Amino acid sequence: MSALALAQLPERVLASDIVSYRLLATPMRYSPAPGVVVDAIGYNGSIPGPVLRVRHGQRVRVEYVNHSSIATTTHWHGMALPNAMDGAAGVTQPALLRGQRFVYEYTPDPPGTRWYHDHAGQMGVLRGLFGMFIVEDPRDEPADVEFGVIFHDVPDFASVQAAMSGRSHAPMIDPMDSPEMRAMKPNDKMGDEVRYLAHCINGATYPNTKRLAVKVGDRVRLRILNAGATQTRYVRLAGHRLRVTHADGNPVPVPMEFDALRIGVAERYDAWFEVTKPGAWLLQGLSSDPLAFQQAMVVATPDMENAAPLSSSQSLEGVDYLTYEKLARGVTSAVDERGITTRKAYTLGGGAWDSSRWTLNGATWPNTPKIAVHRGDRVYVHFKNTTDMDHPMHLHGHVFRVVEIDGKPLARPLDKDVSLVAANGGTLAWIFDANGFPGRWLLHCHNEIHMMDGMMTEVDYIPG
Amino acid sequence: MPFHAVLTLAILVADANTGAKLVAQNGCQACHGTTFRGTTQFPALYGIEHRLSRAQIAAALTSPKAPMPNYGFSTTQASDIADYLSGLDGGMSADQPVVTFAPAHPVNYADVTVRFRGAAPRKVTAVASMSMGSMAMKSPPVTFAPTADPHVYKARIAFAMSGAWTIHIVYDGKTIDRPLVIGQ
């Protein structure tokens, strides 16, 4: 089990200009729940991997060695960094075979809750290669207690193979009354669902999840990451509302409170709550899976550690959960289109029963249409989702601004690095500035099945 | 043997059993097992009525001891859940039929055998359903075939999807529900 209590950095580390880490991808037998044992791969023998932490402005040097039997790389999700450090196998570096080593060195930017994970297309994330990377922002308000919370699901690999060919028979496990469930139609065939053996928080299942000890009066900051490969996660803390201050590590326009957070694959939210009385409460990932209750951890004051913790229903009926539109303070009349130099539209397609194709404009990687930019361009990207699943679209090396959803301009656009495009005709638009490091930057669906099945393209900087 | 594909998606109009709905909404099976038979860490709920009274079951729900969580159930809700759990294995009543499934870990289909005590029924049918929130997968009705023993009926039910199903068996105007996990 990996404890994610976020200790303050020792002074010695604060004083140094460069923080060094060593990460080894190691094969391991992993038992996340009673009776469940899988062959997995963890960073330094742990799932999730260790929390990496630097102050904004410090440089990081990570020596990465692959001791596993699959090809791997390490991608630094949400970082604007030199292209050669991005860790995209086959694009910015060759995949590392067993015994091979790569040194990643860069200055983490922008600050906030980032993460790192495998990016070699061999199901490394599904096997356990992921961890949190915190870049401390000196502008942040201080918290009394800070805690990293990583949600992930442990797959049945036989169902992953079936899902990749679009012939899975696994059921949907989204919560009751979720938009995912409400979008189901008679005779839907969900051929690409993965069947999960366990649903975890920080690598463990209830009641073996680590407890978060708090005191009355504490202002608590949770850094929450959905590191699952395919499932959108709904997160709720019984008896509390959660105040969201950062989305994907970036400050939101105005902090807002919700009953529950809806967290797409690869998304992060920083959520705060205040402990106003003694008690024991469960932080939970909601689901309609009979195994849903595994994804729970206790938050308790000292005198209440052994009390039965207050729990939430797994249903979303009547629950005020986070949406982009709420977080963006509603809609406005028009998108601010000043300075746009380049436009690109993608239709997200595929996903039919019995098909392994997930497409961008009808094509699969590497034959998908790319976006060519000059440094200094301002790029508008529009997505239309014709499939019956949501797609968490991610851009490497940049923060983009979500400006429009389903044709409605957002009043206060959101700075993110991954955003869910809704199923069944949903649309979403980004604007980003091509002011990053030159190179080739992947743009893809972060559902690992969809990415491996071709829903990927790239943004290419044209030299000169 | 009758053979039907289970593919139809239906909206559950009403939940016959409030206790069953509360159990599904609160994820009891995560700890107590997908067929309620317990795990190495947690007790079985299947057959619980032979160990605890309904009042004791309800009290364990409204005044839980950690790591059992506090769901904030009302006494009525706790009583509904106690009723549902007490009937998982057929309950205390001696005239309940005995239902068995084969193979032990079904993947694509299950052979269902129902052995009746006392008077043999004239017709036995079953519907398989799997709740997925406010929606459910639901099979067309399967009619059981009689066997040489008038007290024993058999049917084969096919499944297009893995997961935690419930088999609703109807005979002589009565219904019994049995959990069945497919593909695990």
Image (cartoon, coloured by chain):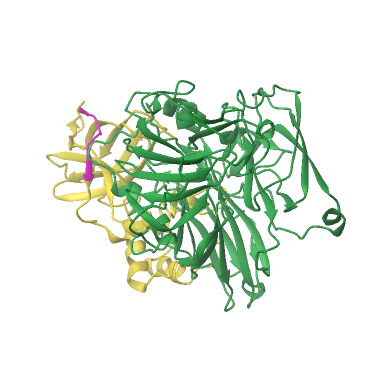
Chain colours: A green, B yellow
Residue nearer the viewer, A127 or A207: A127
Residue A265 can be seen in this image: no
Q: Where does the image place residue A107, in percent across and percent down from the top left?
A: 73, 44
Report the number of numbered marks.
0
The residue range painted magenta reads: B3-10
Q: Residue at x 45, y 30 (%)?
A: A455
Check if residue A463 falls in the magenta segment: no
Residue A62 can be seen in this image: yes
Q: Relative to A320, does residue A274 appear above or below in the rendering?
A: below
Judge left or right: residue A208 versus residue A337: right
Judge left or right: residue B61 versus residue A142: left
In the picture, the quarter occupied by the C terminus of chain A is top right
Residue nearer the viewer, B104 or A286: A286
Q: Which residue is drawn at 62% across and 50% down?
A: A202
Q: Where does the image place residue A123, in percent across and percent down from the top left?
A: 56, 30
Quarter of the rendering containing residue B122: top left
Q: Where does the image place residue A145, in percent across and percent down from the top left?
A: 67, 66
Residue nearer the viewer, B59 or A403: A403
